[in-house]
Image (cartoon, rainbow, N blue to C red):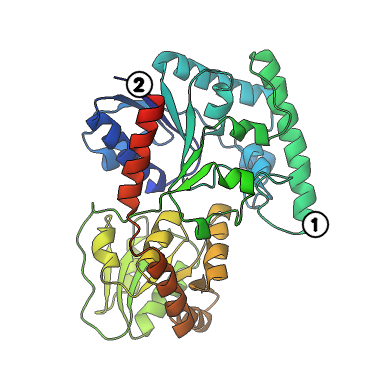
Amino acid sequence: MARILLCWELGGGLGHLTPLQQISKYYIQQGHEVWLASKDVAKVRRVFADLPVKLLQAPFTENSRELGVEKQAASGFADLLRRVGYHDELALTGLVQAWQTLLGLVKPDLILIDHSPTALLASRGMAVPKIAVGSGFSTPDDNSPVGLFFHNEIAKKNALQAEEGVLRIINQVCLTQKIPTLSSLRDLFSQQEFCLTRNYSELDHYGYRSHSQRRDFVYVGSDAGTFGELVDFPHYKGPKVFCYLKPCPELPVLLKTLQSIECSAIVVTAGVPKALIEAHRAKHIVFSDVPVNMQHVIERATLGVLNAGMNTTAQFLKAGIPVALLPLHVEQLLVARRVEALKAGCLLNLQSVETAVASLNRAYSSQAKTCAAIFADKYKDFDPQRELMKELAAIEERYLR
């Protein structure tokens, strides 16, 4: 029996926990001991139920407000790291020491990394195999600067400056904590054996990766969850619209738009004020404040209105369903760009009801439907669950026997 540690340090939502649950379940069934260091321990049991994982709080911090950049998008991956403790030697030292203590407690035979750069840093030099899991966003491309989010000269300059500063702080911490130093930020991620990516290559956040990096990426796709409530679309004319957006200032415009057009809609309302829901009730709209069974929805929907979370977006496209997207942060924006490049959907403009209707019409156009269908046809015989199980078995055979 081996001891496996799953790490989740950065990011939010069930998009991290759901894939980790599938991985945990497989290895527990094979008789291994699974530990989970989770950023959000309060949500673990909602997804893992009574799965016998040993649960720990993952060390993390967030200092965007301290830096005065909470309303500014990061220019690149290094700038993102700067906002989560990599701006200051003492802050990063504390995070690294906390991860080192955790690693010393668990003593894992295998570490699976989901958006956990400090777990990678703290384990640097350890003779333990480390494999990236997740959507692929957390392993930036190997360009210079790494993981550039915006491709203009100002953003590139800012990203390069952030990378120089972050690398300097990392190496200062490495020296005091007796960790091998980095010659570049790419070195932090090169220690990973490979990346088990719950995504499709067309939706890779960073677009086309270098040949050498693509050799270390295994894309196993993303499948729809079968947990959650079975919610059916109302019996009305028009497209069957599934809407899952986090609360945001533009949400009232979208709800007013759905209220005014001919459609049949399911709207997931977790975190949405009740007064806003009551103001937009209509016979052709079903509101749900609990997680819904996505497989059930995808088998019936004809249009998705989403925040461009990778998992849900990929599931809709694999089913041949076009999407209208309202990204709330950079990771989602990168996904939305890939969807637009595929012409299988578009960004959602919620400045007014008129612009919202125009966006929905573009997303539901013949071109978007055709391009979504092309994506679905390519992957019609591709079973993400089967591919995931095959790769998990290969990992077990190679690293745990």
The correct choice, above or below, for 171 with respect to 306 in the image is above
For badge 2, the amino acid type reads Arg
Crowding at dot 2, Cα within 10 Å, few <14 / some 14-19 / many 20+, comes out as some
Identify which residue is drawn at 33% across, 36% down.
393
Q: Quadrant of the N terminus?
A: top left
Disc number at residue 3? 2
Q: Nearer the viewer, mark 1 or mark 2?
A: 2
Q: Quadrant of the C terminus?
A: top left
User: Where on the picture, by quarter, is residue 271?
Assistant: bottom left
User: Where on the picture, by quarter, is residue 64?
Assistant: top right
Mark 1–mark 2 Cα distance, whole angstroms, equals 46 Å
Residue 275 % position (x, y): 34, 65
Crowding at dot 1, Cα within 10 Å, few <14 / some 14-19 / many 20+, comes out as few
Residue 78 % position (x, y): 67, 41
Q: Is residue 184 left or right of residue 324?
A: right
Identify which residue is drawn at 38% across, 70% down.
377
Q: Secondary structure at mark 1?
A: helix
Residue 36 seen in the figure: no
For badge 1, the amino acid type reads Glu
Q: Is residue 26 left or right of residue 131?
A: left
Q: Is residue 198 left or right of residue 166?
A: left
Residue 147 % position (x, y): 65, 47
| Mark 1, residue position | 153
